[in-house]
Amino acid sequence: MAEQEPAAKGNGNGAASASDEPQVSVVAQYVKDLSVENPSAPQVFQWQAQPSLDVQFSLNADKIADEVHEVSLKIEVSARSDNGVHFVIDLTYSGLFAIRGVPDEAIPPFLLIEAPRLLFPFARQIVAEAVTNTGFPPFLLEPIDFASIYMAQVQALQEQDSQQGGDAGSAETEPAPKDS
C-alpha cells in the first residue's frame, strides 16, 4: 500500500492558495423598499384606455465594511393613461457582496455590472408579482445591459475630462476635507 503524503499548501499545481485568490460572494439579497400603489381602484378596472408604461432604474453602490459592499437596484414602474394612474411600483432591491483580493480597478465594474446582473432576475420577479397583486397582468421587465450602460458612463466621463482641457488631474490640487 502506498503511503499518502499530507496535502501541500496551495492548490496542488504550484499556484497560490485559495486565500490569495480573488473572492466574491453574495452575503445577502433583500427588499430594501417596496411601494405598490393602485390609487384609482376600483374604477381603473373599467377604463378602456391602454396605459403607457414608464420604467426607470438607478444603481447605487456603498461600501459597508472593509470587504463588504451594498449594491441597490432601484426600479420604478408606472402605468398611466388619460383617465389617470393605473398603478405605480417602486422597488429598491439590494444585495451585500463580500469582495476579497480583487484589484481596486476591478471593483467598480463588478459593483456596477455583475452585482446588478445577479440582482436583476429577483427584482424582475418582485415587480411582476407586485403588478399582478394590483389586479393587472404581470409585467416582465426587459433585461438591462448593465455592461453597456457602465461603458457609456466611463466614455462620457473620459469625454468630459478631455473637454476640460485634458488636464483634469491638476484641477484637484487641494486635499479633501477631513472629517472631524
Image (spheres, grey):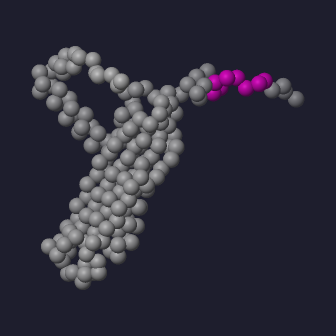
Look at the image and tell me in which quarter the C terminus lies.
Answer: top left
In the rendered image, residue 119 lying in the magenta stretch gets the answer no
In the rendered image, residue 57, in percent from the top left (x then y), is placed at: 29, 52
Write the residue at 32% across / 45% down. 59
Write the residue at 32% across / 63% down. 89
* Magenta stretch in the rendered image: 5-12
In the rendered image, residue 140, in percent from the top left (x then y), is placed at: 34, 63
The answer to whether residue 108 is visible is yes
Count of residue discs: 0
Write the residue at 24% across / 67% down. 79
Write the residue at 26% across / 58% down. 55
Look at the image and tell me in which quarter the N terminus lies.
Answer: top right
In the rendered image, residue 6 lying in the magenta stretch gets the answer yes
Relative vertical location of residue 72 with respect to residue 130 in this rendering, above or below:
above
Q: Main secondary structure of the magenta part?
A: loop
Relative vertical location of residue 74 with respect to residue 172 in this rendering, above or below:
below
Residue lying at the far front in this picture: please name it.
Answer: 180
The answer to whether residue 142 is visible is no
Relative vertical location of residue 15 with respect to residue 26 in this rendering, above or below:
above
In the rendered image, residue 43, in percent from the top left (x then y), is placed at: 25, 81
**Residue closest to the eye, 98 or 114:** 98
Asked where in the image residue 39 lies, by quadrant, the reply is bottom left
Residue lying at the far bottom in this picture: please name it.
Answer: 46
